[in-house]
Image: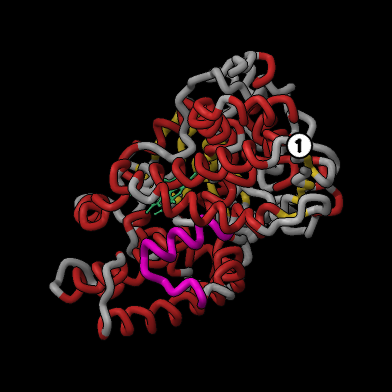
Amino acid sequence: MTSLSREAMLWPENTAEGAHTSCDDGSARQRERAGDAWDQAMNEVEPMTVNLFDWERAHESARAAREQGSVHPATLPNGVRVWVIGGYDDALAALVDQRLRKDGAGLRRILGAQLARLGKSSRTSRMYGSSILFLDNPRHDELRGLVSALFKPRPIESLRPRIEFLVTQLLADLPRDTPVDLIAHLAFPLPLLVICELLGVPTQERAPFRAWTAAMMEDDPDRVLEASDAMEHYFGKLIVAKRAEPDDALLSTMVQLHDQGDLSAEELMDMVILLFVAGHEASTNLIGNGIQHLLAEPRAWRSLGAEPNLIPSLIEEILRFDSPIRMAPMRWTEEPVRYGDVTIPAGEIVLVSLLSAGRDPHQYPHPNRLDIHRNATHLGFGQGIHYCLGAPLARLETQVVFDAVVRQFPRARLAVASSELCHKPSMVMNGIKALPVILGR
Ligand code: HEM
């Protein structure tokens, strides 16, 4: 077996991201700002000249923002005002900082007031409901404890044969000589099938799932609400069906936990929606971003086929280099919170930019190089009590996929230039919409 040279797994500095004019949908335009406390706080910090929500130039924008400071007030494309933390040290501190609240009721109050001021419905989606992602302790740990055993590395590892089987099936009939979209045919369906099987969601009913999840992660409050309502309706019916006819999967267990008084009806619904959405959307991005960057370096792609033991460290490096989650889901301040020389006032929404932290040059030498030998820690799965519950599952799925594609398709290549790949217009998700590849023979 040949030894994979360090050079083969060092990618060139990835700074220029190309023009991407074909991807622009206007959503990245900054809106006018309003509001007293925020304006006052704005006067005390250097105004930022960078658009952090330009999806196609995300790394360039993040770098420019970091150069102006680690903590910035910003306006989302939908007009909602937030504070973004982008330096690695402050990002890490914020993720574990219990002064930054997660509690969904408080978040819905702040977000609802902002949306109302913008003339939009103040109703927020179920993603900001009572799932563990939007709960503080002690309730967070109680609820997480109800499901966490299933997601530990050992039970997850037992899924390997099933995941290998699904990957084999998904790859079986793909064309070799014409472009095939590896998001639509692999990176999206695999994690979806796996989380559906874990939860006990009938996979034959999955037709609308992609549109729902995509809309939930977008920035347009109307589309988000529409998708959230559709999901609530669907899972409401499924919960009734599982109660009538329980099976061995997680949703039936959760229904049982509800029926014996361990979680409320609202918590049950919000947990199901969280597990369903979190359980596939970010993994799709990790697989898609990873294949995209690997294909940019054909020699590395082929070498990896010969040395699959390097795949786990490659996955960690991709989580740093192009974080599948752009910004960790919202936190909020109950009291003024200071990072470095910036004070975020009380009652503000805070976003931690994992994408930016992953390329902070103070933390990582040559941050714009994908270096499989880096062995560095990253914040891609978050940190603290909200650390990703599904990290072992996401790692396993990605490992099985990478292992299969590099071995089966040593001559695979991108069917379009990297600069033509368009990103999802999402504040939370960092992934490409489609990945056309010629798999080759
Ligand atoms: C590459 C794939 C994934 C990435 C990058 C990712 C990333 C993250 C991050 C950054 C957080 C922390 C959010 C915060 O602090 O606000 C998180 C939380 C969470 N993730 Fe993942 N995730 C992935 C896959 C999954 C999968 C497959 C599941 C399946 C169940 C999952 C379930 C969750 C849950 C339930 C939480 C909330 C944990 C809590 O609040 O205690 N994730 N994830």
Q: Is residue 71 left or right of residue 301?
A: left
Question: Quadrant where the N terminus lies?
Answer: top right
Look at the image and give the residue range highlighted in magenta: 189-204
* In front of the other: 128 or 83: 128
Nearer to the camera, 110 or 424:
424
244 w.r.t. 142: above or below: below
View extreme (left): residue = 260
| Residue 13 in the image, given as x and y percentages of width and height | 73, 22
Residue 96, image quadrant: top left
User: Is ligand 1 within 8 Å of the beta carbon of the residue shown at mark 1?
Assistant: no
**Relative to 96, 82 lies left or right:** right
Q: Position of residue 338 (x, y in %)?
A: 42, 33
Q: Residue at x 38, y 65 (%)?
A: 129
Is residue 405 placed above or below 372 in the rendered structure?
A: below
Q: Amino acid at mark 1?
A: Arg
The residue to which callout 1 is attached is: 411
Q: Main secondary structure of the magenta part?
A: helix
Mark 1: few/some/many CA within 10 Å (<14, 14-19, 20+): some
Q: In the structure shown, which secondary structural element does the residue marked by tag 1 occupy?
A: loop
Magenta span has 403?
Answer: no
Q: Quadrant of residue 317?
A: top right
Q: Is 61 situated left or right of 132 in this image?
A: right
Q: Position of residue 106 (x, y in %)?
A: 36, 59
Q: In the image, is residue 318 above or below residue 154?
A: above
